[in-house]
């Protein structure tokens, strides 16, 4: 028997501001905003939305998300602690719920003496979001360690993706399902103390070159093949370019930082100005790394 959406009114916040749930602190409201507390409730809710033909979107920490000022119609489901946040280490494998923070998965792996993920220190968001966007940096991407991803499809089915169903490219993956329920990562043994030192060095380097104390959503643009988006933007003289209360970071030109009173329209306008300038000067079309709703 199909659940009615009315059965989920206890976890429903109608017309909820999405700005407070994203790192950029921008954007309009969700028509229906749900915060499930367990996996079964999450799956039942998704299936109820599908049955009622209500559009549904799912997100985690909102670290890589720009919500338009007009908001989002239909249902928006937030996956936040403790939902899907468990992390288990078994031999050289780490299995984490899709809602677990990537920073927690990194630190648990290092503590267990498992190498690979220490290179991802300082990347915000959940492990589910990291998988979908194949998060990474100069030293490694998360995709190379993924062995199994459990997802819920847009039809509400639970499916495991393995083998040929898993492909990863620069800041992209074959995972286009509605939500990641869990991921299994295959790592390699190493000395925990050595890994900790390596992780701290990478963190210090990132902190010195990125505006981590500011309100931002990480890198705005993907790096074009063989090039640095930040360097291209800087060479256009766009560091500190502002539209309203949104501006290009003076510390790293591929970051947009927002202040009080900023709107999503400010950020979108800034993105357009940067794209046009880089295209005119270098003939390069910058692609977004953040997602827009």
Image (cartoon, rainbow, N blue to C red):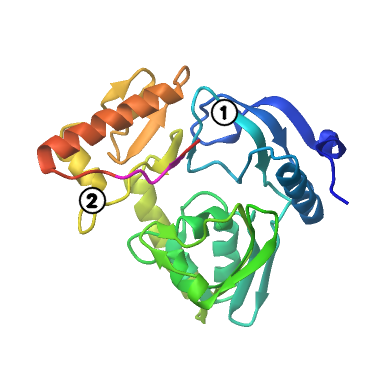
Q: Earlier in the sequence, mark 2 or mark 1?
A: 1
Q: Does residue 47 lie above or below 94 as drawn?
A: above
Question: Which disc is residue 228 wearing?
Answer: 2
Q: Decide if residue 88 is on the left or right side of residue 249.
A: right
How packed mark 2 is, by other alpha carbons closer than 10 Å (few <14, some 14-19, many 20 or more), is some
The magenta stretch spans which residues?
Answer: 287-291
Q: Does residue 222 lie above or below 151 as drawn?
A: above
Measured as percent of width and height from the top left, residue 12 is found at 77, 33
Measured as percent of width and height from the top left, residue 162 is found at 56, 74
Q: Residue at x 26, y 43 (%)?
A: 286
Look at mark 1 in the image and give the residue it sits on.
19
Q: Residue at x 29, y 30 (%)?
A: 272
Q: Secondary structure at mark 1?
A: helix
Disc 2 versus disc 1: distance between alpha carbons? 29 Å
Residue 107 placement: quadrant: bottom right
Q: Is residue 144 visible?
A: yes
Q: Main secondary structure of the magenta part?
A: loop
Residue 269 placement: quadrant: top left
Q: Secondary structure at mark 2?
A: loop
Q: Does residue 225 lie above or below 279 as drawn?
A: below
């Amino acid at each position: 028997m199909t659940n009615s959406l009315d059965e989920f009114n206890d976890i429903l916040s109608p017309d909820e501001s999405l700005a407070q749930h994203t790192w950029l602190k921008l954007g309009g409201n969700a028509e229906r905003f749900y915060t499930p507390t367990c996996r079964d409730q999450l799956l039942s809710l998704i299936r109820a939305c599908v049955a009622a033909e209500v559009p549904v979107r799912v997100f985690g920490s909102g670290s890589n998300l720009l919500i338009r000022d007009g908001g989002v119609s239909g249902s928006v489901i937030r996956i936040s602690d403790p939902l899907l946040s468990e992390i288990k280490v078994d031999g050289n494998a780490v299995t984490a719920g899709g809602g677990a923070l990537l920073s927690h998965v990194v630190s648990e792996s290092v503590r267990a003496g498992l190498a690979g993920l220490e290179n991802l220190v300082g990347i915000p968001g959940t492990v589910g979001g990291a998988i979908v966007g194949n998060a990474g940096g100069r030293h490694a991407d998360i995709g190379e360690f993924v062995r199994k991803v459990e997802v819920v499809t847009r039809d509400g089915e639970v499916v495991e993706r393995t083998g040929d169903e898993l492909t990863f490219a620069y800041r992209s993956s074959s995972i286009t399902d509605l939500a990641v329920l869990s991921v299994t990562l295959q790592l390699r043994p190493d000395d925990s103390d050595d890994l900790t030192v390596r992780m701290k060095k990478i963190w210090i380097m990132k902190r010195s070159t990125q505006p981590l104390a500011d309100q931002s959503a990480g890198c705005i643009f993907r790096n074009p093949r063989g090039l640095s988006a930040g360097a291209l933007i800087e060479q256009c003289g766009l560091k500190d370019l502002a539209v309203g209360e949104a501006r290009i970071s003076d510390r790293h030109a591929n970051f947009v930082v927002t202040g009080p009173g900023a709107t999503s329209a400010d950020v979108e306008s800034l993105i357009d100005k940067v794209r046009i300038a880089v295209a005119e000067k270098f003939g390069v079309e910058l692609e977004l790394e953040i997602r827009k709703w």
